[in-house]
Amino acid sequence: MIVDAHHHLWDPATRHHPWMVEALRRRFTPADLRAVTGAAGIDRTVLVQTVSDLGETEEFLATAAASGGLVAGVVGWADHTRPVPAQVDGLPHRDLLVGVRHQAEDEPDPGWPARPDVVAGVASAAAAGLVVDLLVRTDQLPAAVRLVDAVPRGRFVLDHGAKPPLGTDAYPAWRAGVAALAARPHVVCKLSGLFTLDRQDLLGPAVDHLLAVFGPRRLVFGTDWPVSTLALDHASVLERTLAFLDPLPAAERAAVLGGNAVRTYRLP
């Protein structure tokens, strides 16, 4: 079983994506998803938000409901500075909403994840049974630690390993920050979004660090497709990820590729 726990869909003609580079500015549809997942042998996926828009969350839930089980869950957007259940509980197909995310990496304030209003919003999401995905920069990792400490009953997933700043002066801070998060047992990390980083020659030690601090029982696989197409085709993302996991025993490799995502996001 392979679960892609992190991918996107979008249509730039209908919604503005401030972060989107020109090479990605085309429509990616459920049919496109089915083509690449079928070729790769991926059984189920988690569809993740791309913009700060509750309307996108509602659309993604409808997409999941119409996918015949391929999209097994949605990590949608909700305003983390307000109670989350009040925003999402009335949405159609609410049962397919497995988590929420805000693109905190775009917030200028390094302390944004630990703001009192954010902590309160995240706590409300956790109380409603939703996972909270953390998309943060290296300088936001200390605040992310404070957030997860403030919500000890929550379930958190660190997206893209916090995008290790390979070959930069910030790399030691990244290593320390992800190790601090990994010391909290209610935090899981996505092995995703790494192949579009600069300095791919330095990626191996960063992946080794994530494996060491989180362990193979708290890592989940994600392609970050179609953002990943900036660097590799879909098949190559899976191939390179498998190469990183090859030294693991079969049971641990299977956990990273599927079992951990099912458990973390409580997928059917």
Image (cartoon, grey):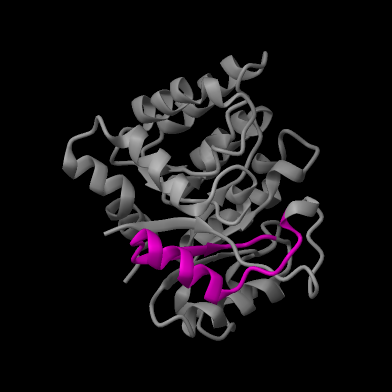
**What residue sits 28% from the left and 41% below the top?**
217
**What residue sits 53% from the left and 20% below the top?**
202
Query: Is 95 or 31 nearer to us in this picture?
Result: 31
Is residue 250 covered in magenta?
no
Left or right, 220 with respect to 178, comes to left
Q: Residue 196, image x and y in percent?
A: 61, 39
- Count the labels in the image: 0
Q: Residue 38, image x and y in percent?
A: 39, 67
Left or right, 54 with respect to 228, comes to right
Res. 44 image quadrant:
bottom left
Is residue 28 covered in magenta?
yes
Left or right, 241 with respect to 228, comes to left
Q: Is residue 155 above or below residue 9?
A: above
Q: Is residue 1 above or below residue 68?
A: above
Tell me if residue 124 can be seen.
yes
**What residue sits 61% from the left and 45% below the top?**
135
Res. 144 image quadrant:
top right
**What residue sits 60% from the left and 56% below the top?**
226
Left or right, 266 with respect to 91, comes to left
Quarter of the image that includes the C terminus = bottom left
* Residue range (magenta): 24-50
Tell me if residue 186 can be seen.
no
Q: Residue 188, image x and y in percent?
A: 41, 43
Q: Residue 125, image x and y in percent?
A: 54, 61
Q: Is residue 80 above or below residue 198?
A: below
Res. 52 image quadrant:
bottom right
Quarter of the image that includes the N terminus = bottom left
Query: Is 47 or 243 nearer to us in this picture?
Result: 243
